[in-house]
Image (cartoon, coloured by chain):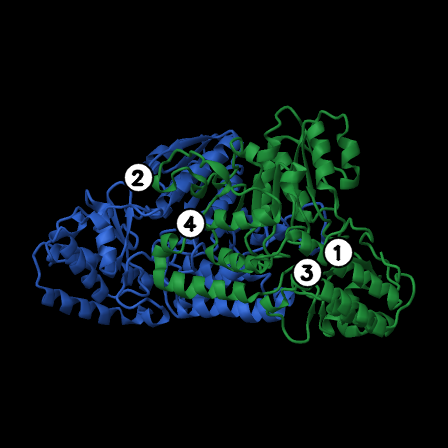
Chain colours: A blue, B green
Amino acid sequence: MSDTATTPSSPDTLRARAAELDAAHASTDRRDAFLLPEGVIYLDGNSLGALSVAARDATANAVSRQWGEQLIRAWNESSWWSAPERVGDRIAELVGAPAGSVVVGDSTTVSLYKAVHSAARLRPGRSVVLTDPDSFPTDVHVTRGVCDQLGLTLELVSPGDAVARLDGSDDVALASYSQVDYRTGELWDLAAITSAAHDAGALACWDLCHSAGVVEVGLTAGGADFAVGCGYKYLSGGPGAPAFIFVAPEHIAAFTNPILGWNGHATPFAMSPEHVPADGITRARVGTPPVLGIAALEGALTAYDGLDVADVRRRSLSLTAFFVECLDGLGIDLPVVTPRDESRGSQVSLRHPDAYAVVQALIARGVIGDFREPDIVRLGFAPLYLSHADVLAAAVHLRDVVDGREFERAEFATRAAVT
Amino acid sequence: MSDTATTPSSPDTLRARAAELDAAHASTDRRDAFLLPEGVIYLDGNSLGALSVAARDATANAVSRQWGEQLIRAWNESSWWSAPERVGDRIAELVGAPAGSVVVGDSTTVSLYKAVHSAARLRPGRSVVLTDPDSFPTDVHVTRGVCDQLGLTLELVSPGDAVARLDGSDDVALASYSQVDYRTGELWDLAAITSAAHDAGALACWDLCHSAGVVEVGLTAGGADFAVGCGYKYLSGGPGAPAFIFVAPEHIAAFTNPILGWNGHATPFAMSPEHVPADGITRARVGTPPVLGIAALEGALTAYDGLDVADVRRRSLSLTAFFVECLDGLGIDLPVVTPRDESRGSQVSLRHPDAYAVVQALIARGVIGDFREPDIVRLGFAPLYLSHADVLAAAVHLRDVVDGREFERAEFATRAAVT
């Protein structure tokens, strides 16, 4: 990963290297846009992105000025009605999709339900939907549920085996995968799997929860048919932020929403009992959008204003590479689950038999990461608000937790309700 | 409705009567809890309830303190994870349901999809779902969509004819109705229709969007099987607030969520690929809950603290009765669509051939109501923050708009994007 990777480095050497890298990536430093508490190194932006000034202010404005003063008039005066498409367009830029192909609202799970339910029906006569057995569980659950409803067969195939499974097949309707593995951080080849799906006459749906905002997703370039993603991870839209759904322009006319709501109607205020789907991506809407959540997300996305995702990706790769460099340099001997080459998202996952307690001990030191079953210390590096100096500081804390066996303290063993 | 109803009254007489009624209903006056702008009489709380101090503060706290400072730890430290059930329990009290039978999250449309999809499958062998052709369109759309997916027949039967349709039938799986008609304000007999459904071996699902918070809904007393309702109307939870779903305790074990997400799982953090539904109403959850929206709703619901819904209902009936009394007393000769007896929710709908322009002219005077196709002036009377004095003032404005033919001004004819 680096020419210093296998040689222990002095903290001073690493500190100098951090400063050099931070200078090299200064153009993508958006730390000032965020409101992180003092004393915290936040390595969980892949689970809940940090609060930004703009997200805070946008929410306060939506509450006090728009809702409080404009009241019902805000649907027009503050353009609430078109917010799902407006914010969708902003996200489209970040994931390499054209305007008019992304809309926000609903949770990620509901969005995936809509995408998979519609996509699988676009290939009648084909009986198989592929997904990753190691996907974040909601993906497996919702996809299996759709298969059961549509009389299809869910086949669990690792993304690493998907191209081989698709090759020469004629039974697959849909391949539904995450671009980045939530646990290991592995980045899968969206274009290659999509291309294999297309060659086999199937469609491809992508979950971008762990890639949107940090990876050059390239939906159009990769030929993706459908995608969904989360608003509250790297996009920093706030807890339970609305998710997004992407439908490739060539499929929009054939997209049939399984949940027929008035917001997806061509003329919602005509109050017609016949459902006529709206033109365009609007047909993927369902009910009244979560306006406050969208406001927070829209504010948060301004952190990307003036940035090129390619530069953010470079910063992300540099941060994660430098973390591994620090592990090596500081002699932290934990197995790195995440690929050391560039086929990774913006996280580094480590194995430790007491991973839960290690994470708790880190949190007690102000280094917030998370634990994933069964033995994963998962550290996310949200590039916009983390520096290489933060990365080094986190690595030093990790060394002290591991070398000092802090994780053995009784206080770190008790599991919280939500881990 | 009142012994003064057909005799024109002087404004002074009506003013004295308003003061007398406001004194009689002082115990349910929560005006101080809300932040209505100066000069506005807000008669659209049935579309978007007003902002309360508590909702504003709860949202700011959720953003700045919980999200901003606790970050990911807020899932435990601020009990975000259990918020859907906690807020559900508070709503349960307002709609006459037991603790553990209501959960919030998702939009009303998604909630109705879950309820109807599950309910209709609880009566296998029966092929018909009844709903109201005049329901709010999303109800008809989503119910028809579910029927198409399940191979059932949607039969459009007015709630006024539902008991007769059900009598002696054996083909109905589910009767799905709104308790209050969104357009006319008519209150339907939840207990009678539910009882007729049960006598016919069917289930009943209720949409409480226009009754929760203002009517003694009586889900348990009426024997309702399923229900959904909106958080942003009379409950004042904010724009696009999360909706709620009720599943009667006797059906919870048989409730199968059509959208299988990790939040409805028995052990969500075990990350198991097998979906094992949670015990209890939690199985009606889907994805990560919209925390900011739930925070606003939870704050808003504190406006009901210390109030009995029966008293709120009495205030609501008094406000709407007094409005009709004012119409009569001031000689405003518009047809009243809403029942003059007590079979009404908390609104009064009037007909006028230029209804859209009448509403715009009222808004220009600070009296905010809304228009519903084709010719309805719909005025909602959110009881917690409206007084009888407001009602009289609104009626005087309406008289001036109608008698002065203000609605004929060109500026009031142009339709906004969202009406």
Q: To which residue does mark 2 refer?
A: A160
Please rate how many residues cluster around mark 1, counting C-alpha atoms within 10 Å: few if below 14, some from 14 to 19, many from 20.
many
What SS does tag 3 mark?
loop
In this figure, what is the number of numbered marks?
4
Pointer 4 or 3: first along the chain: 4
In 3D space, how far apart are the residues under numbered discs 4 and 1 (Cα atoms)? Answer: 38 Å
In 3D space, how far apart are the residues under numbered discs 1 and 2 (Cα atoms)? Answer: 65 Å
Residue extending farthest to the right is B7
Tags 1 and 3 both on a single chain: yes
For the N terminus of chain A, the image quarter is: bottom left
Horizontal relation, residue A185 to residue A92: left or right: left
Q: Which chain carries label 4?
A: B
Three-letter residue code for mark 3: Pro
Q: To which residue does mark 4 refer?
A: B81
User: Where residue A57 sits in the image (x, y, percent)?
Assistant: 46, 70
Three-letter residue code for mark 1: Leu
User: Residue sitting at 46 percent across and 55 percent down?
Assistant: B291
Three-letter residue code for mark 4: Trp
Mark closer to the observer (4, 3): 3
> Hey, which quadrant is residue A39 in on the image?
bottom left
Q: To which residue does mark 3 refer?
A: B383
Q: Do the residues labelled 2 and 3 touch (CB within 8 Å)?
A: no
